[in-house]
Amino acid sequence: MKYISTRGNAPELTFEDAMLTGLARDGGLYVPETVPTMSKEEIAALAGLSYEETAFRVMKPFLGGVFSDEEFKGIIARAYTGFRHDARAPLVQLGPNHFLMELFHGPTLAFKDFAMQLIGQLFQFSLARRGERVTIVGATSGDTGSAAIEAFRGLDNVDVFILFPHGRVSDIQRKQMTTPEDANVHALAMDGDFDDCQAKLKDMFNDFEFRDGVKLAGVNSINWARVLAQVVYYFSTAVSLGAPDRKISFTVPTGNFGDIFAGYIAKKMGLPIDKLVIATNQNDILHRTMETGAYTKEGVTPSISPSMDIQVSSNFERALFDAYGRDGSAVAQLMDELQDGSFTVSQGAIDVLRDTFASGRASEEETMAEITAAFTQTGEVLCPHSAVGVKVANENLGDSPMITLATAHPAKFPDAVEQAMGARPDLPPHMADMMDKPERVTRVPNDLEHLKALIKERIAAR
Ligand SMILES: Cc1ncc(COP(=O)(O)O)c(C=O)c1O
Ligand SMILES: N[C@@H](CCOP(=O)(O)O)C(=O)O
């Protein structure tokens, strides 16, 4: 099993090297050369298995033998012990044919834990056997950062630097990143929005002297292992509702396109997915692209679902790669054009994308109204991101059961939830004292040289 870049001009890597590398050296994202498939019988055999066993069976074909079965099973078992629900990704019913997949029972209360806890274990295993250390730099709109810090805190052979947009994450998200006391954790509040943070991260990867000097690694969904870990819950939930004997649809609150891309991979592997619906907030570049074919940046407007306040949706590049028949030079050209603010998807490619993905958007008012409606009608308390998903899913219900992904716990966004419902959601007991803890954070400008110097200085001081 080899991994290739979406821009067609970087070395082919094994699963382990692609995971430790992050961004490809041509600026592209790694994808498997071919996507392994599961037969109908293999999918049916997942029924009744634990989440961990399902994870092992779904992910193993992507590893190319870099871990033994025993090693990989141990890694998976350690990754999911910190989850507070036995099912890991339980389903609750919202309506006759509509279900919610609760992905917020991990340690930091967001779907990011599913992949980040696994990556934490994978990195520890690989770095120990190679005798290496890495510097992780991550960009976050709130949830990736806290999940990464939780997964890597306290490790001697990893420093983790998290860039988040100053003033644009919720108080809980900020506290999750700034209160850990471990010396290898560095929370950096940057001037700008999430897209600025992600652009700086990619600039660091494209500076080979810096990248090689600090042994840069990435744990955003540019990292293939992040996407792979998220494929598992599409299988576990679809099978629990009758797949492969019936088709299942999914609606995914979307920002950086990693989570829905995992659903697309599940479909390519053979899971009978009917509709795969992109749900955006008012920062709706993906919905506009699906409607018009023009991917045009308009600037980010802060919303009540801040983790989805994204305009440069990193993993869309992976979908474009397939839609353009895996033509890396065509993708490289589109990404060059995006530097000037926009590109137009060819008719052939947009047709392919429309065959696979539907889309919709929720305004701020609609998101609020959905939190209120879901609570009144079902008793389920939604976070604003999940509410965007439920609103768009309701517009896409059909014959097949619809599963909407609930991507974060409502207590991470208490202000919006309180405004919609009149009651403030409680944090789980393990986080109850978080708001009282002192914070450790460095305010940084949107300046590449400044960031590189700071990172080098911090590593040298450890
Ligand atoms: C709570 C929440 N919902 C949805 C998303 C969007 O997911 P993705 O970036 O994989 O599209 C994010 C951020 O990634 C998030 O943190
Ligand atoms: N919403 C994300 C943005 C980064 O996405 P990622 O999946 O690429 O890590 C966040 O919470 O940081």
Image (cartoon, helix red, strand yellow):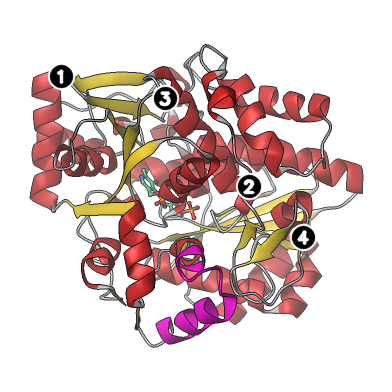
Q: Measured along the vertical axis of the image, is residue 294 above or below residue 156? A: below
Q: Tell me if label 2 and label 3 are in contact, CB under 8 Å.
A: no
Magenta-colored stretch includes residue 329: yes
Q: Secondary structure at mark 1?
A: helix
- Magenta extent: 320-338
Dominant SS type (magenta): helix
Q: Tell me if label 3 and label 1 are in contact, CB under 8 Å.
A: no
- 297 sits left or right of 51 in the view: left
- Disc nearer the start of the sequence (2/3): 2
- Disc nearer the start of the sequence (1/2): 2
- Disc nearer the start of the sequence (3/1): 3
- Identify residue for label 3: 243
What residue sits 48% from the left and 16% below the top?
A: 87
* Of 37 and 207, the residue lying toward us: 37
- 122 sits left or right of 435 in the view: right
- Identify residue for label 1: 378
- 145 sits left or right of 206 in the view: left
Q: Secondary structure at mark 2?
A: helix
- Quadrant (top left/top right/bottom left/bottom right) for the C terminus: bottom right
- Disc nearer the start of the sequence (4/2): 4
Beta carbon at label 3 within 8 Å of ligand 1: no
- Label 1 and label 2: CA atoms lie apart by 35 Å
Q: Secondary structure at mark 3?
A: loop
